Image (cartoon, rainbow, N blue to C red):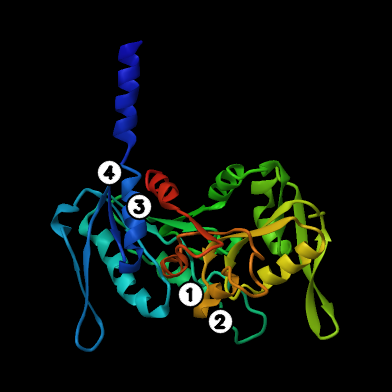
Amino acid sequence: MEVDKVETQQQQQQKQKHVHLFYCVESEELARNIAARSELITLQSINWRNFDDGFPNLFINNAENLRGQHVAFLASFSSPGVIFEQLSVIYALPRLFVASFSLVLPFFPTGSFERMEEEGDVATAFTMARILSNIPISRGGPTSLVIYDIHALQERFYFGDHVLPLFVTGIPLLKQRLHQLPESDKIVVAFPDDGAWKRFHKLLDHFPMVVCAKVREGDKRIVRIKEGNPAGCHVVIVDDLVQSGGTLIECQKVLAAHGAAKVSAYVTHGVFPKRSWERFTHKDNGMENAFAYFWMTDSCPHTVKAITNKPPFEVLSLAGSIADALQI
């Protein structure tokens, strides 16, 4: 029996991949956290420089030793200005005769621009998907593309055959955190609209639920509770991302007016352009303690740096989940 056990452990070790992980500048902290979660991940570095004209002058360190190795890149497309230099590296790495190549893009930034409402609209989600679909094939085959909570599930069909998209969710991190709270049996999950409900309700079906909706009253669109009862409960609003946060604030007001004991929020991607996270911080005005907790992942590094140690924000790291995804 002991011999069989040892043989099984050896077989499992043989199946595990040792991954060389490269990363962009703003994702360094997340990359280090990922490497700390697994002895099978080794960090590698890139010299991110620019020529005098502003165009990238890049160098992949240790390139000659990557042949036959499993390689991954942790990207952050936080603004159009950083995408080109990262794409240059992403297109170069698979050509170094690597055994396999994985691209981890926690936040797919153009995901909310996935459809046309009138002729002339440009669905930039499709454009980004086409760009990523043309990553060169490595010796091991198509690139594995890891994305967390993409805005619309149908966007999986935007990608071509040269990449294998792996769509992951941050919801298990939220569920783990909720179970750590006192009175976790009084938690109700709320969705700001039908889209969020369709997206996440099956992952949270053991919690009571409230669904909100925007209804038109005259020239205004007002948030109302469509179904469910928040009275006396700790209500957690769940969505994939937040931009200005206006919808979350309107939902909080409605939930509180209907008797919610506390209101918190979770988003996988805290985008928060123009420092819009500031309207949620606890301070001496009307928003003080409006949200007991505001959870998000570290998919948007600039936001994570800005909200550190600022209640009600709390970061749930994707590091362990990404380390696991790199072994698939």
Quarter occupied by the N terminus? top left
> Going from the N terminus, do you reach mark 4 or mark 2 first?
4
* Secondary element at tag 4: loop
Q: Nearer the viewer, mark 4 or mark 2?
A: 4
Q: How would you rate the neighbour count of disc 1 (Cα within 10 Å): few for under 14, some for 14-19, many for 20 or more?
A: some
Q: Residue furthest front?
A: 284
Pointer 2 residue: 122
Residue kind at label 2, given as amino acid type = Val
> Going from the N terminus, do you reach mark 3 or mark 2 first?
3
> Going from the N terminus, do you reach mark 3 or mark 1 first?
3
Q: Residue furthest bottom?
A: 53
Is label 4 in contact with label 2 (beta carbons under 8 Å)?
A: no
Residue kind at label 1, given as amino acid type = Thr
Q: Position of residue 55 (x, y in %)?
A: 25, 83
Residue 144 image-quadrant placement:
bottom left
Pointer 1 residue: 127
Q: Cα distance, mark 3 to mark 1?
A: 31 Å
Is label 3 in contact with label 1 (beta carbons under 8 Å)?
A: no
Task: Please give the label number shown on residue 18.
Answer: 4
Q: Is residue 15 above or below residue 237?
A: above
Q: Residue furthest right?
A: 218
